[in-house]
Image (cartoon, rainbow, N blue to C red):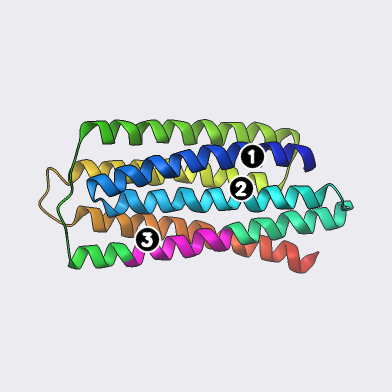
């Protein structure tokens, strides 16, 4: 993985950090919990890329066996981050259902969210092509996370749009759905990477 991992991690770090800032702005401006949670998810992706970057540097200095274990460890840590993030979403979504607040909907916000979906989809394609040439559990995790993020943001966008049509705590429900999807997917990744670490 090595040098390819470093380049991929830098690309992911920069892109995810920009997406985080954009969604954070929209979430705070619109007072939407689901969008804010989606932003935190991108922050988690940004941190994951830092872990991949550090792991890739170490991999350059390790033999194949240690390299595989390092990649599995990085994937395991990424999974932990995403699981915690998912539970955070679900908890806050439940709280928002009990204490709903007014959401400020603007078409420009919806358009920007649609753009972030396209960006994440493109990232997933790039990761997929990189993994075809340099197969790694880390790249497979990033592929899964990118396409999962597309679905999560799509759900967020639907919920955000529905808030102006339905007088109910749609935002809170969407946050719970997002949190559950992220947590379950990440938990599966943790189990898979844990097996790799245990079996060596």
Q: Which residue is mark 3?
A: 89
Foreground of the two, 47 or 171: 47
* Residue 89 sits above or below residue 61 on the image: below
Q: Residues within 10 Å of mark 1 (few under 14, many from 20)?
A: some
Taking depth in this image into account, of 111 and 200 the one nearest to the observer is 111
Which residue in the protein does label 2 denote? 49
Instruction: Give me the disc on residue 107.
Output: none
Residue 10 is marked as: 1
Residue 20 position within the rendered picture, expressed as x and y whole percent measured from the top left: 44, 45
Which x, y percent locates residue 165? 12, 43
Q: Quadrant of the C terminus?
A: bottom right
Please state the horizontal and vertical placement of residue 175, each as a whole percent of the image.
32, 56
Residue visible at 37% across and 60% down? 89
**For the point 80% across and 52% down, which residue is it?**
58
Range of magenta residues: 79-91
Percent coordinates x, y for residue 166 in the rendering: 12, 48
In this rendering, position of residue 16 left or right of residue 37: right
CA gap, disc 3 to disc 2? Answer: 21 Å
């Amino acid at each position: 993985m090595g040098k390819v991992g470093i380049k991929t991690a830098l690309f992911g770090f920069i892109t995810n950090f920009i997406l985080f800032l954009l969604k954070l702005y929209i979430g705070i401006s619109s007072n939407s919990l689901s969008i804010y949670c989606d932003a935190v998810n991108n922050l988690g992706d940004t941190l994951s890329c830092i872990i991949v970057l550090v792991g890739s540097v170490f991999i350059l200095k390790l033999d194949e066996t240690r390299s595989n274990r390092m990649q599995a460890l990085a994937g395991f840590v990424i999974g932990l981050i995403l699981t915690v993030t998912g539970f955070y979403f679900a908890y806050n979504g439940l709280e928002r259902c009990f204490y709903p607040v007014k959401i400020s909907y603007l078409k420009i916000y919806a358009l920007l969210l649609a753009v972030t979906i396209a960006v994440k989809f493109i990232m997933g394609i790039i990761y997929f092509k990189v993994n075809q040439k340099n197969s790694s559990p880390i790249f497979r995790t990033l592929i899964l996370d990118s396409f999962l993020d597309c679905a999560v943001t799509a759900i967020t966008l639907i919920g955000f749009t529905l808030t102006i049509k339905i007088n109910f705590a749609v935002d809170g429900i969407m946050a719970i759905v997002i949190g559950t999807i992220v947590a379950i997917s990440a938990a599966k990744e943790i189990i898979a990477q844990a097996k790799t670490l245990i079996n060596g």
